Image (tube, rainbow, N blue to C red):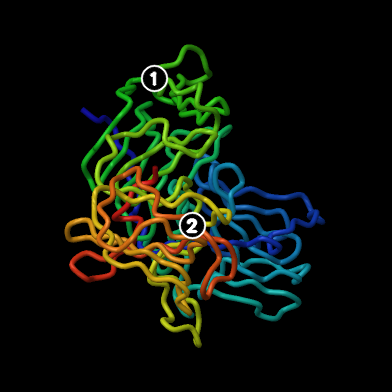
Amino acid sequence: MIRARARFAAAVTAVAIAAAGLVAVAAPAHAATTYTGSAPAGTWLRAGDQVTSPNGQFRLVMQGDGNLVEYGIGNVVLWASNTPNQYGAATVVQKEGPLSIIKDGKLVAQWGPKSSPTKALTVSGDGSLRLLDTAGKTTWKLDTFQNRVPAGTTILPGTVLRSGSGRQQTFTMQADGNLVQYVGTAAAWSSKTFRHPGATAAVQADGNLVVYPKGGGKALWASNTSRKGGGALLVQLDGNVVLYGKADTRSWSTKKVTGLQWPVAGTTITGRYGDDRGAGHVPRYHQGTDSPVKVGTPVYASGAGRVTTVVRNNASYGNYVIVTYGLTTVLTAHMSSIAVTKDQVVSLGTQLGKSGNTGQSTGPHVHVETRVNGTLKDPLTILAFR
């Protein structure tokens, strides 16, 4: 039985911005203020000021360079306003109107309705940002999320990790001490450590995931994976929560991994399915998912299937292979070499070839596309990481 479930609004729009070079921090010129949970209407967030989630794990920081940035666990950048080089700017939670960044009386950026009485700007336990009106209703929301937690960090009570945009797969450190995975509203797994309010979950540097009682002491639950080395905890789109070790291979998961697997070893993603690549790209919206790996990395079959297409030197995809697994096809592109032939029967351990940088590619990676009954699907909902 799952006790005292923490309730948070579901995410509907994911924002994950690679903000390298855009989040440099300048020293604040005044004593910084922290607003816990919410900042009331009329608040001016100046350099160094921040609004945090109730337990402080998610932080929306007004930086000295004029950039408004949300940080998650392990100081991971979840969102940035992309307004650098606006030194001296401030973020204003207006009493009526949008959330605004203002410098020298001039508008730099804004979010939310142009005319609505505002009560507060909030940062929730799942990292989402909201403007509330005076009746407490949401008038604007930015559903940022964190689905990956690096080794050496701790998940505090009330924190909710989410698999992605609009997804109901969550991993929650509840206030009652229970670490719980939810799929929709149903509990799919738990550490069974309720009745320990204030307990925390540590993603340890040795590769172990451990639930500790408040204040520390003897472990209440552990994954017993300390020999795997520190990697990361990932709340996946396929409905699984997986702990990866130092070698980026799976060491523990909330459920047994079945079905088709990712073509390469690794969990890092640089391009997601559906990403808008801008006008001029054909197709404009990304049809697959990109995994950055070095040239020559082994590319494997996702399961038991048959090679149905082998193409070399395609202008767009370079060298690519399509394997059919029942109703599902998996295309792997930009390969440096291909080791299979058309109609060859393959299994999970069969090497299809090696990754590369062929065709229309901006750097070494594998591009993965999945189709079910001929219809494009998000690969991360079909394939499980190895």
User: Is 16 placed left or right of 373 in the picture?
Assistant: right
Give the percent coordinates (x, y) of residue 385.
Answer: 39, 46
| Relative depth, front residue between 241 and 249 | 249
Residues under labels 2 and 1: Cα distance?
33 Å
User: Is 385 placed left or right of 53 in the picture?
Assistant: left
Q: Residue furthest top?
A: 218
Position above or below: 337 against 384: below
| Relative depth, front residue between 30 and 256 | 256
Amino acid type at circle 1 is Trp
Instruction: Tell us which disc is closer to us: 2 or 1.
Output: 2
Q: Image point 48% across, 25% down: which residue?
A: 208
| Relative depth, front residue between 167 and 294 | 294
Q: Are marks 2 and 1 in contact (CB under 8 Å)?
A: no
Q: Image point 29% across, 55% down: which residue?
A: 382
Residue wearing tag 2: 291
Tell me the number on the disc at residue 47: none
User: Is 319 placed left or right of 87 in the picture?
Assistant: left
Per the image, label 2 sits on a secondary structure element best described as: strand
Position above or below: 284 against 349: below
Amino acid type at circle 2 is Ser
Per the image, label 1 sits on a secondary structure element best described as: strand
Position above or below: 113 against 365: below
Report if residue 114 is visible in the image.
yes
Residue wearing tag 1: 221
Q: Image point 35% across, 47% down: which residue?
A: 350
Mark 1 Cα-neighbour bin, 10 Å: few <14, some 14–19, many ≥20: some
Q: Residue furthest bottom?
A: 280
Give the percent coordinates (x, y) of residue 319.
Answer: 45, 68
Mark 2 Cα-neighbour bin, 10 Å: few <14, some 14–19, many ≥20: many
Q: Image point 47% across, 51% down: which residue?
A: 127
Report if residue 113 is visible in the image.
no
Query: Where is the N terminus found, in terms of image quarters?
Result: top left
